[in-house]
Image (cartoon, coloured by chain):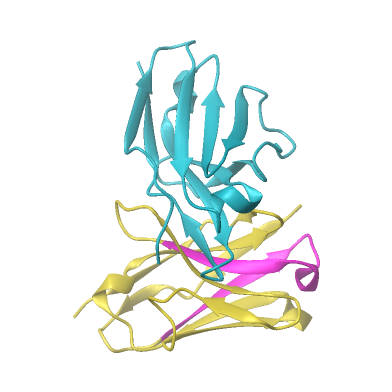
Chain colours: A cyan, B yellow
Amino acid sequence: QAGLTQPPSVSAGLRQTATLTCTGNSNNAGNQGAAWLQQHRGHPPKLLSYRSNNRPSGISERFSASRSGNTASLTISGLQPEDEADYYCSAWDNSLSAWVFGGGTKLTVL
Amino acid sequence: EVQLVESGGGLIQPGGSLRLSCAASGFTVSNFYINWVRQAPGRGLEWVSVILGDGTTYYADSVKGRFTISLDSSKSTLHLQMDGLRAEDTAVYYCARESDAFDFWGQGTMVTVSS
């Protein structure tokens, strides 16, 4: 099943800002937006945002999501060492009747 | 407190069967969609299946016809019956609650398909 497209890696400096992207089509990310998940090695994923820019309780305001057309973005401001992790986007695909994920982006904090 | 606890993973030979379970607590399972998502070693997340409150099920093409998802609401337990297992099914299997997105995840159970 076709998934969402994410760059394999992104790096940015401590206390700087990183922007991660996720490109899909009108049946998934371009429809109801994408959700973003953070995963540290050896741990299950953690939801950061959903429906483009809604944050679950307890998620820092440093994590901000948006959408433009078929591309979703996650902006992380004031980067901290603990932000170094893998980030995945996900969306329900109306055409496939399936959830699709991006391949994940490994964020490195320099 | 919402909790999801998977069990049932292990080492199984190709062609074999395994039944995973996911015990849910802290919420009413019939009010949510519950999914299985897997992650092969060193790889990304792959959606496997979902069961809706009315019993409707959906599957990824890669497991359709081999895996069966079910929900025992009386025991708040989700199951994944996996038949005809292949080496490429080797992964950590997570159950995840869906509320607009996957908002709660279990710790996962490892399934290794190898002879």
Q: Give the image location of residue B33, x and y in percent.
A: 69, 68
In the image, taking residue A27 as reference, residue B112 lies left or right, namely left
Residue B107's place in the image compared with B95, above or below, is above
Q: Residue at x 28, y 71 (%)?
A: B88
User: Magenta region's main secondary structure?
Assistant: strand
| Nearer to us in this view, B107 or A93 | A93
Q: Residue B89 sits in which quadrant?
A: bottom left
Residue B101 in magenta stretch: no
Residue A87's place in the image compared with A109, above or below, is below
Q: What span is in magenta?
A: B18-38
| Nearer to us in this view, A25 or B66 | A25
Q: Residue at x 39, y 88 (%)?
A: B83
Q: Give the image location of residue A27, x and y in percent.
A: 55, 59
Residue B33 in magenta stretch: yes
Q: Residue at x 39, y 42 (%)?
A: A6
Instruction: Count the marks.
Output: 0
In the image, taking residue B94 as reference, residue A61 lies left or right, namely right
Q: Residue at x 57, y 77 (%)?
A: B58
Q: Quadrant of the C terminus of chain B?
A: bottom left
In the image, taking residue A41 as reference, residue A52 lies left or right, namely right
Q: Residue B23 sits in which quadrant?
A: bottom right
| Nearer to us in this view, B86 or A42 | B86
Q: Give the image location of residue B62, x and y in percent.
A: 38, 75
Q: Give the image location of residue A82, x and y in percent.
A: 48, 25
